[in-house]
Image (cartoon, coloured by chain):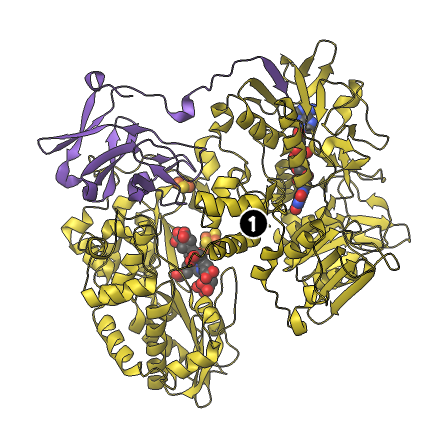
Amino acid sequence: MVGFKFCEKLSSKSDLFNIVVFGEEPRRAYDRVHLSEYFNGKTTDDLALSPEAWYHERGITLFLNDPVLKIDRSEKTVFSGSGRKVAYDFLVLATGSAAFVPGIPGIEKEGVFVYRTIDDLDLIKNYSVHAKNGVVMGGGLLGLEAAKALIDLGIEKTHVVEFAPRLMPRQVDDHASFMLASKLKELGLEIHLNQNTSAVEGADRIQSLLFRDGSRLAADILVISAGIRPRDELAKQAGIRVGERGGIIVDDTMQTSDPSVFAIGECALYNHTIYGLVAPGYEMAEVLASNLCGEAKRFSGFDMSTKLKLIGVDVASFGDPFIQEPECKTIVFEDHHKKIYKRININKEGTRLLGGILIGDASAYNLLLQTVNNKMALPPDPGEMILGPRGSGQTNPGAGVAALPESALICSCEGVTKGAICQAVSQQGCESVDAIKKCTKAGTGCGGCVPMIKDLVTYTMKSNGKHIRNIVCEHFNYSRQELLDLIKIHKLYSYDEVLDSLGKGDGCETCKPLISSLLASLWNEMILKRGNDTAQDSNDRFLANIQKGGTYSVVPRIPGGEITPQKLMVIAEVAGKYNLYTKITGGQRIDMFGAHLSDLPHIWEELISAGFESGHAYGKGLRTVKSCVGSTWCRFGLHDSVSFAIRIENRYKGLRAPHKFKSAVSGCIRECAEAQSKDFGIIATEKGWNLYVCGNGGSKPQHALLLATDLDSETCIRYIDRFLMFYILTADPLTRTATWLNKMEGGIDYLRDVVVHDSLGMAGQWEAEIEVLLNSYQCEWKQAVETPEIRKRFSHFVNAPEEKDPAVKFEKLRDQKKAVDWTAATGA
Amino acid sequence: MMNEQTTNWFAACRVEDAVENGGVCVKYRDEQIALFYFTRRNEWYATQNECPHRKQMALSRGMIGTSAGEPKVACPFHKKTFSLRSGECLNDHECAIRTYPVKVENGLVYIGVGQHEPTLNSVPASAPSENHVTL
Ligand code: SRM
Ligand SMILES: Cc1cc2nc3c(=O)[nH]c(=O)nc-3n(C[C@H](O)[C@H](O)[C@H](O)COP(=O)(O)OP(=O)(O)OC[C@H]3O[C@@H](n4cnc5c(N)ncnc54)[C@H](O)[C@@H]3O)c2cc1C
Ligand code: SF4
Ligand code: FES
């Protein structure tokens, strides 16, 4: 990582250098910090720090899979494993570190791994298939990450064994470790502290661990994470000075004992310290690149503050976390119920923050870190910094950034200060986080500072007297809300009309889908008519979701999840005929994947003639209304939830909104349809239905809130009508109902007033308006296949309509097919 | 720059086959070219169909528009945007796409395919070698 950063810095500062890079691993430099995401679907290409062409564009020669084996310092030449011999003027060692493997008897057995490279992860993944008991040796930062990976791999029981009396001994104190351990236990991890392993047991493969106290722990797979060893072997062999306990000794210009040889990153030992984090490594890269280009910069150590999300738990430590009374005063907050621990250390006078630890809630981290680093004055009651005024836990971020000095380092990965960010806002017109990222690179490393950048942008714009209005984009000087009203008043029906009458310029990928969605919500016309097709998001334009490789998915509507055997057979036939992958979705229906663009109209023609309709899986509108089996079969069922779900789904199908919305109906409070996680959910009671609104699954799950109780079916539908219209008319673009409610002043009580008590007096109008929209419903796919000029668009080549895209490639998986991975398809 | 005289013009489609304010994909030998009819500006553009980000044959299905007057296309996969004029990526400067000249005559749309211009990706950056750095 650090070697890559160095190449980036050097090649952008100067083009006088001819850079040759040797890498021992078979792939381009990648993001080790987010290594664990490899198990959550990130590919090697996602993790790569640069696209393939990057080195080439900068004239850098890259030899992969080719470790340097020897340095000849007198000849200034290196020799590689494959026999290459390259002369140098300057040699930079950025060899990183390796996992430290303790010399325990039996440690060489099969099933014992380390956790450092993508190759390690592949080995673990393959081996873990049959493993039931996973053990991680080492309860530090990396060990806990490895434990999370084992859980993600589906290992039934995962244990963490730590030699020290606490977890993360380098970052947190005993109390914090206790809180962290109890939180991790809740998540299914077994933690063993004070355990000293004396042997790894088993025939060829590992079967158990034996501890010094005589106890044993069953283990089919062991991941060792007992610390890191700087990779100084090459330097040592070449006679360059290394530290007693490892690490290539460098001065504050990163120079080793040989003036032509430098070391940066985790292999470098500066001031008796190995910096096992990426930010200090990047700083070393900056120092070295500057010095080689004739700028005098010095490395002066680095702050080791960290904030991480470990297994979903926030953990942060900053400044001096361990300093104790009487050298300082500490303020501690512990909540054993929510498993939150916060500690701050302040100086004896109570004027300066020295450091601290946060477990379970690290939202205050950025601000606290800045307060330490910039020696900022503390508020009269410093406890407020972790508790918020009157203990409400609220902090005011805007006030926070205003108080920071200009020199405050906001992004430590890229070394960007508050001053630089504010200047980019004021003088270069960067008014969004993306613009700041592009212009200053802040926020492009670990991403931890992004919330602070956002605050800084807002704060600077405000203090420049800029009114922050949510305008759509450079082509429309209006908010979504304003546009909706204007389109309605002026009766505009196509994107072009809207742009001509209300906008300027030629439109873009932000305003096009937004206005298309407004037009659909207002008039509910076929979305591909009136030349509106190219103003739709790609998925809407082809009425299907685009997938890896450029094929599409086909999702017919299956209201309430109920389907006849005959219809199942039709799906089976169609999927067989067009060679589609089939899967039951999380929304209780069947998805067919991997359809060629030109096959879509044929597939839909067959489905439609068997009575299917579009499922709108591609559109921002109603998705599914899930149901449980309900009173027709279930012994607890109070009402017929399936019938009601089908009725609801058929009622609202095709309705377009600012974002997709979902629903479910459960037949009793056991809630098998998960209605409380939906945009609106209905649960049967003895007396009728309870209506819940504004729930969300997805990345930020949120339970739906009770809007009204014991409703009869008609009233329930009336309330849903009003609720949906209110949402459609007022929500920001791409805002789900949960987020919409979160931003609503007055919250659920206000919403209830509007929907149930009609406090705005809009109920009658909304009910009438939604009726018009619902009555104009037509199946989009039916219209598409029956309208020749629309149907014609479903071909890959305009000049060879019968040919399919030859770039589409599949491979076999179990008994079906799958899309070839991004990386494999490119041969990278 | 592409030179008019030596350009080899390939008849891609008729004007009415192209999609207004959007793209279509044209097959030329083994290549796929995205052809855009920016009707609003009465301009035609052609670029490689492959998005360099994840090597997806998708740009012809992207939305077109402008950013400060610069015509651009957004890839449907991850919304990387590219200038239709220069092929430069407008989100980061790490990849670029190849562009082709387009002309319309007698209702037919022609794409200039004659010369293979080096793209940004394949230009070997010349690095005068005074110093060597090895890592
Ligand atoms: C197919 C399916 C996964 C599956 O195999 O089960 C799926 C697939 C996709 N989901 Fe989903 N979601 C599917 C059920 C869900 C569910 C479960 C549910 O509906 O009960 C959720 C959580 C519930 C919720 O939405 O509150 C879900 C939350 C998301 C989100 C996060 C939304 C959020 O508010 O955070 C996205 C991203 C988005 O919409 O911006 C998403 C986006 C996507 C997209 C459209 C991503 C994309 O743009 O390509 C995927 C399209 C795949 C394709 O090519 O067709 N999908 N997705 C499920 C289709 C259900 C259906 O029958 O229509
Ligand atoms: C799972 C995991 C999670 C992490 N999480 C965080 C985090 O949240 N925050 C944080 O700041 N840090 C984190 N780190 C640490 C961070 O990844 C390292 O600090 C960083 O990678 C160090 O960069 P480097 O370039 O010095 O070493 P590396 O990234 O290890 O690169 C060194 C490269 O040199 C190669 N090499 C070695 N010897 C030779 C040779 N003789 N010839 C050629 N090539 C050679 C190696 O194969 C390796 O590819 C994490 C690390 C891991 C493993
Ligand atoms: S289906 Fe949904 S959860 Fe699964 S990878 Fe796609 S977007 Fe993510
Ligand atoms: S493939 Fe085009 S943006 Fe990712």
Is there any visible trace of residue A605 in the rendered image?
Answer: yes
Picture quarter containing residue A100? top right
Ligand 4, seen in the image, is in the quarter at top left
Residue to which mark 1 is pinned: A40
Q: Secondary structure at mark 1?
A: helix
Residue at image location 35% in from the left, 37% down from the top: B82
Give how far across and how far down residue B35 sits, in percent: 24, 36
A406 left or right of A495 in image: right
Camera-side residue: A54 or A165? A54
Residue extending farthest to the top is A75
Chain in purple colour: B
Q: Residues within 10 Å of mark 1 (few under 14, many from 20)?
A: few
Give how far across and how far down residue B31 sits, in percent: 30, 28
Picture quarter containing residue A31? top right
Type of amino acid at the residue the image marks with label 1: Asn
Residue at image location 48% in from the left, 47% down from the top: A425
- Chain where mark 1 sits: A
Looking at the rendered structure, the number of numbered marks drawn on it comes to 1
